[in-house]
Image: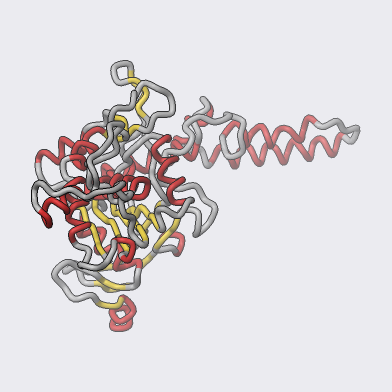
Amino acid sequence: MIAISFRGTCTPIDLVTDASIVQDAWVEGEDVTKEGVMKIHSGFRKSLNSISRRLKELVLAAVEPGEDLSQYDVIVTGHSLGAALATLFTTDVAEYGMDAGRSLPQLEPSEPWWNSLATSILGKDSKIGGAPPPPPRPKSLKMYNFGSPRVGNDAFVAKFDSLVKEGRIDSAYRIVNGEDIVARFPRTVNALMLGNIGYEHCGPTVLISQPKTKRNKEGEIIGKNEVKDGLLIWVEGESDDDDCPVRDGVALSNPLSEGALLGDIFSAVKGVTEPSDDIKQVASRLGSVAEKVTSRLQKLSATDITSVVGVNKKFSEREMKIIQSFFNGEAIAHHLEDEYYQGMGLACGYIALVGEDIRPIQEIEDAV
């Protein structure tokens, strides 16, 4: 097995890379103004482009003499910026193989993928006769990333999903810890100066819940973990049919749809308009409607107000939650590597703290 791990943001230049939202063509040389062109985050592409070719050479060099890359399972991972690079690298290898003749996909022909290896082994002027073989592919290709920002537009995501469906990517999961704000950005932007810049997630989301743990003043656990909805791990498309809370969803909706304020009131009133000769029946309906409308208004929220003007209520709730998590500190705290380590430990039934031994939660709870 060969494991490839990309580090996260840790230098000032990485912060500049993360902050950019401008997009370049995934395949260098393609016209980004054309509809349907795969586009990705400009900073992420430049960052990976600077190391990808050398990384592929190192992967090929790691294959034992007499063996082939097709005998190896390759796992790609990373956190934060590293997770974004892991996504792009996996996409490249899945579609084109371990092409060490160039860095990232390009319209221009690349050099032979084996050129650098042949030079290292046989010398600078070495040549291999015959038609060049295609770039080798691993036995399996899997990607598990942590706290990944969104990397590309809908066309790029469609390409990634097709590679998973075709089996070129054997497994891909995007793990998000609680309210991690980075995993919810960049957002789709439609601005006068920048134009329409779209971003979406690649692969299914694995959402780790952050249990509320009862602790004393010294930070020691004094009670059992309280887990929201009883779930420590939620997997998009597998745990249930609910919408992924990390995706943007649809911003606009019909103000009269079910769940919206006007929609619920309209549904309650609609029954009264049905014809009836029985005055008692009509009066009963009116009483029932008044009760329903009063009950609904008592539960009025900020998202109900936005639904009146056609803003999707679930979208508003998701936006409000992002804002709240930012102000209470969870948005940034949940993105840290230590928090991911702890969150994954809790999800698996362990207390996992950096620099300390991993301990089963049940063992600690039994002792309190």
On the rendered structure, is 151 left or right of 354?
Answer: right
Q: Percent x, y for residue 320?
A: 38, 39
| Residue 80 seen in the figure | no
In this rendering, the answer to whether 306 lies above or below 330 is above
Q: Residue at x 46, y 36 (%)?
A: 303
Q: Quadrant of the C terminus?
A: bottom left
**For residue 153, above or below residue 365:** above
Residue at (16, 45) in percent of width and height: 51
Is 276 left, or right, of 41 in this rendering? right
Tell me where residue 225 sits by quadrant: bottom left
Q: Nearer the viewer, residue 236 or 299?
A: 236
- What colour scheme has been applied to the protein in the rendered image? secondary structure
**Where's residue 184, x and y in %?**
33, 42
Name the residue located 28 percent from the left edge and 48 percent from the top edge: 130
Kindly give the residue lying farthest to the top in the view shown: 192
- Give the camera-side residue of 163 and 221: 163
- Image coordinates of residue 339 in percent, x first then y, are 24, 58
Say whether residue 365 is visible.
yes
Q: Residue furthest right?
A: 277
Counting the numbered discs, the total is: 0
Determine the image quadrant of residue 275: top right
Image quarter (top left, top right, bottom left or bottom right) of the N terminus: bottom left
Q: Residue at x 37, y 43 (%)?
A: 321
- Name the spot of residue 216 as percent of width and height, x first: 22, 69
Q: Quadrant of residue 323?
A: top left
Front position in the image: 356 or 3: 3
In front of the other: 165 or 297: 165
